[in-house]
Amino acid sequence: MILTDSILDFFLETRKHTEHLCTPLEIEDYVVQPIIDVSPPKWHLGHTTWFFEEFILKPHAKGYQVFNEDFSFVFNSYYETIGKRVVRADRGNLSRPSVQKVYDYRHYVTKAMQDLFSENQNQELLDLLEIGIHHEKQHQELLLTDIKYILGNNPLLPIYSNDFKEHPIEKHQQEWVSLEEGVYEIGHNSEDFCYDNELGRHKVYLHSFEISNKLVTNQEYIDFISSGGYKKFDLWHAEGWDWVLTNNIEAPLYWHKIDGEWHYYSLKGLLKVDINAPVTHISYFEAFAFAQWKSCRLPTEFEWEATQQYFPWGKRWEWSESAYLPYPNYKKADGALGEYNGKFMVNQKVLRGGSVATPVKHTRPTYRNFFQTNLRWQFTGLRLVK
C-alpha cells in the first residue's frame, strides 16, 4: 500500500521539476520543433498535464470540468483509444494555446489532483497516480534532450544553463568483468514500481563473456574516427552504412571540428570535447560499428542486467544488442494504458541504465528503454563485451 501523503508529495515534486527544467528558456523556445522526433517544450508541459486529466480526473473526480475541450486533441500523443490528435510533426505549429495558457492548465489540473487525493484513498487511483508520475518523469528526460536539440540546432548555439553537469567522467580504471555461463533470472522482482515491459521475470541461459566496467570514452571514439571508422563499410550493417552515406555522418551528434579540434554543443554552449568523458549522442549503428572496430560487441540486455552490479551506470543510456520484445507471458493492460509499451515492440533496440538527463527516483536495473537504430538525440553511449 502506497502512503497517500508520500505519493502526493512525490507528485507535487515531479510537477515542480518539469517547470524548473523550463526556467532557462526564452518564450520563443517553447514552440520550436526542428524534427519530428523532438517535441516543443510547450507540448511536453501540456501533454503531461493532459495525462492526469484524461486518465484520472475525468473518470474519477466527481463533477470535474475539463480546462479546455480542445486540449485532448492538442495534447494526446499516440493513444488511439482516446481519439483524434494533432499529427506529431505538427506540434511545432501550435502557436496557440499560449505558453501562459498551458501553465494555467498545469496549475488547474495540479490543484484538481490535490483536491481529489486529499479525499480519496482508493488503491486503484494511487496506482494510476504512480504511473502518471513516472510518465511525467519520462517526459522530463525527453524535455531536456529536446531542449538541447532545439538550442543545439540554433545557429547561435545558445547556453541553456551553466549549472548542468552533462559530461561526468568515470575515474575508475577499466576492467573486464567475467561472468560464467549459466542460467540467470531477468526481470523486475520487487514490490517497487516498474513498467509492464519489465514484468514476466524469467530465466535465460548466458554463455560466458567479459564486459567492460567503463563506458567508451570520447578519446576512444576520436581514435575510431581518425582511423577512418566512418569510411569503412565492412564495420557497418548495410542499413547503417546507407544511413552514414545518405546523411553524411562523420561524428556523433553535436560534434563540430573547429581549427582541427573537436568541439561539441553542450547545455553549457560550445565546448572542446572532453576526451575523458563517455561518448554520447551516438546511434545504435555507430555503437555497433565501433564495437566491430574494437573486435568486440555490444552486450545483450540480459548480459547487461546480469552484471550491472559490477559497474556504475546512469551516465549514458547504453545501447544493447537486444531487440525490444515482450518477456514471457507479457500481457498488455486493457484500454488506453495498454498502448503505453506493447505496441512499440517492433523495429527498436533496447537501451539500459539511465543518463544525466534521467530524473531521480525513475530508473532501475530492470528498466528497459527503447529507440530506433538511427536515433541519437538522447544521451546514448556504449559499453563493450568480449
Image (cartoon, rainbow, N blue to C red):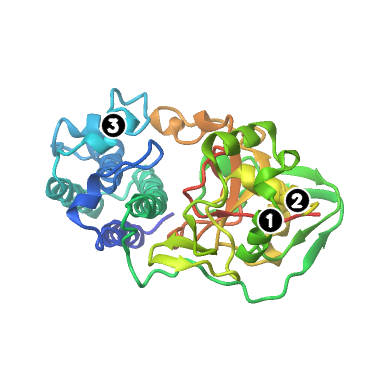
Q: Which mark is residue 293?
A: 2
> Regarding mark 3 in the picture, which secondary structure is present there?
helix
Mark 3: few, some, or many residues within 10 Å (few <14, many ≥20)?
A: few
Going from N to C along the chain, the mark reached first, 1 or 3, is 3
Nearer to us in this view, 27 or 273: 273
Label located before the other in sequence (1 or 2): 1
Q: Are marks 1 and 2 in contact (CB under 8 Å)?
A: yes
Which label belongs to residue 224? Answer: 1
Q: Residue at x 82, y 61 (%)?
A: 178
Q: Is residue 359 left or right of residue 112?
A: right
State which quadrant residue 336 falls in. top left
Q: Position of residue 144 (x, y in %)?
A: 37, 55
- Counting the numbered discs, the total is 3
- x and y, in percent, of residue 54 in the image: 27, 36
Residue 175 in the image: above or below residue 333: below
Give the CA distance from mark 3 to mark 2.
40 Å
